Amino acid sequence: MTDTSAGASAAQRSAGLGKWEKETGHVYSATTFAFLFSPTGVWTGMQKLSHRIEVKGDEIEFTSSTEIFDTSGVQITSGCATGVGRKM
């Protein structure tokens, strides 16, 4: 799985690489990691995005979290989000 972000310059966040897998029934998980860089191109850390995706007919529910790590692997911040969507 790959991801991109419209919230960060391509020079400051690499594409995320990871996996997408079926958990049970209509529930899936996805996890990606991306490299983060300063405006001058210095590596500053990594971002981990984790998603739980539940498909209910045409409806899709997302529960997501993000963790930011420095270059030593120490977590420096985190956050979460929820979302809904519809299959097209």
Image: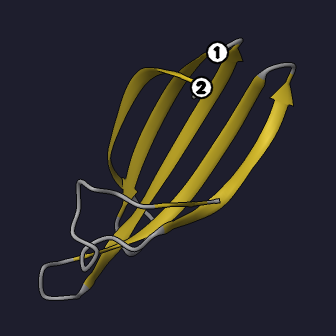
Whichever of callouts 2 and 1 sits on the residue coming sooner in the sequence is: 1
Residue at the front extreme of this rendering = 88
Report how far apart the C-alphas of labels 2 and 1 lie in the structure.
5 Å
- Tell how many labels: 2
Q: Position of residue 18 (x, y in %)?
A: 64, 60
Q: Is residue 63 left or right of residue 25?
A: left
Write the residue at 55% across / 42% down.
Answer: 50
Residue 36, above or below 2: below
Circle 1 residue = 58
Write the residue at 59% across / 25% down.
Answer: 87
- Structure colour scheme: secondary structure
**Circle 2: element type:** loop
Q: Position of residue 84 (x, y in %)?
A: 46, 18
Residue 8, above or below 56: below
Residue at the right extreme of this rendering = 25
Q: Quadrant of residue 53?
A: top right
Q: Position of residue 54 (x, y in %)?
A: 67, 20
Mark 1, other Cα within 10 Å: few <14 / some 14–19 / many ≥20:
few
Write the residue at 34% across / 57% down.
Answer: 5
Q: Residue type at mark 1: give it.
A: Asp
Q: Position of residue 34 (x, y in %)?
A: 45, 67
Q: Is residue 69 left or right of residue 60?
A: left
Mark 2, other Cα within 10 Å: few <14 / some 14–19 / many ≥20:
few
Q: Quadrant of residue 13?
A: bottom left
Write the residue at 40% across / 74% down.
Answer: 14
* Quadrant (top left, top right, bottom left, bottom right) of the C terminus: top right
* Quadrant (top left, top right, bottom left, bottom right) of the N terminus: bottom right
Q: Residue type at mark 2: give it.
A: Lys
Q: Is residue 27 left or right of residue 58?
A: right
Marks 2,1: beta carbons within 8 A: yes
Circle 2 residue = 87
